[in-house]
Amino acid sequence: MKFNILLAAALMAVGLQAQANPIVIKYSHVVADVTPKGQAALKFKELAEKKFPGKVEVQVFPNSQLFGDGKEMEALVLGDVHVIAPSLAKFGKYTKQIQIFDLPFLFDDIAAVDRFQASPTGQKMLTSMTSKGIMGFGFLHNGMKQLSAQKPLGMPADAKGMKFRIQPSDVLEAQFKAVGGNPQKLAFSEVYQALQSGVVDGTENPWSNIYSKKFHEVQSYIMESNHGVLDYMVISNAKWWDGLPADIRKGLREAMTESIKFGNKVAYEEDAAFRAKVIADNKAKVLPMSKEQLTAWREAMKPVWKKFEDEIGKDVIEVAIKSNK
Ligand code: LMR
């Protein structure tokens, strides 16, 4: 009897403890809530907390509030944050193969990127960094990048001597060097200021980032170049993830898969709307590019493919080319 009472009390204490201490998941990113990544993160919070009321709490930190892009990967590996979704241009330190996503003019559009990511070659990349403590849940779209600058960039020669902000990617560095530009690796949170103050003359980003971070207010021209992709991998600390109870892991994975699907839908459906908003704001002039112009840019940047072929793998590049229909 006494034993039973003690056991019941102990079980109650454990139960209360579980109730009092939900599993806290910190999801940090660098963009605005309205973007595909911002919306995917909020969707994950909604779904995960609905599945595990009182047991799981997801804290979303947008706009580099918790960690900027220079620190978030390190923070994840150290266990200071649990989920992040860095741009695929920011994995260079961990895997060379993912550099494929930065090759200029490789993918025709997001649908082609989608097909490549869904291929066995693409899917393998999600687990390619587990030995480094990083586990990939899935790929998440943002969109095709547009070139922007203080002057029109009709032809590659127009970029000569200009300073461009780039993400920390050697491929992107080579891409701007190929047209005589002067690329500078800068954190995302510093881009607006750098453009405004003239530290750099131009940059590249998809419409949702341009609009939500007001880059169009500090750039005079945006070229509709669609010359590359800016996508993400949603990742977590592999050790932390493996240490979660199996039922929680299962439910969280479902919530994550669903949230990525949602983010990708936003990316597909809202890219044009963000473009329209930039045009409606009438701050930067949005210039279409002719076939001839695009061909000239493609030719000028093409040597970058060869330069990184060994690091990325010729076979991987071939799979990507085939994903264009
Ligand atoms: C950038 O640094 O330009 C992007 O990677 C930001 C982001 O996460 O979309």
Image: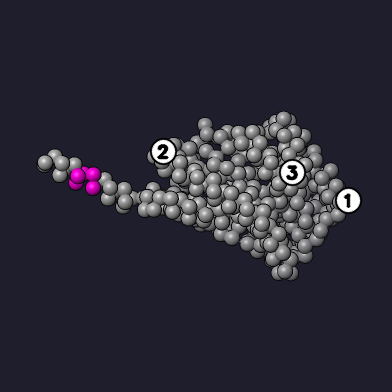
According to the image, label 3 marks what residue?
A: 107
Amino acid type, callout 1: Glu
Looking at the rendered structure, the secondary structure element under dot 1 is helix
Q: Are marks 1 and 3 in contact (CB under 8 Å)?
A: no
Name which of mark 2 and mark 3 comes first in the sequence: 3
**Left or right: 171 in relation to 263:** right
How far from the left and from the top, in percent, is residue 182? 74, 49
What span is colored magenta in the figure?
A: 8-13
Front tag of 2 and 1: 2
Give the residue at x 43% y 53%.
49
How far from the left and from the top, in percent, is residue 1? 11, 41
**CA distance for labels 2 and 3:** 38 Å
Name which of mark 2 and mark 1 comes first in the sequence: 2
Residue 175 appears in the figure: no
According to the image, label 1 marks what residue?
A: 292
Looking at the rendered structure, the secondary structure element under dot 2 is helix
Q: Which mark is drawn over residue 159?
A: none
> Foreground residue, 163 or 258?
258
Around disc 2, counting alpha carbons within 10 Å, would you say few (fewer than 14), some (14 to 19), or many (20 or more)? few
**CA distance for labels 1 and 3:** 18 Å
Q: Which mark is drawn over residue 246?
A: 2
Amino acid type, callout 2: Ala
Give the residue at x 39% y 53%.
53
Give the residue at x 83% y 55%.
289
**CB of mark 3 near ligand 1 (< 8 Å):** no
Front tag of 1 and 3: 3
How far from the left and from the top, in percent, is residue 184? 68, 49
Residue furthest toward the left? 2
Q: Quadrant of the C terminus?
A: top right
Front tag of 2 and 3: 2
Image position of 50 with respect to 130: above or below: below
Q: Report the magenta stretch's main SS.
A: helix
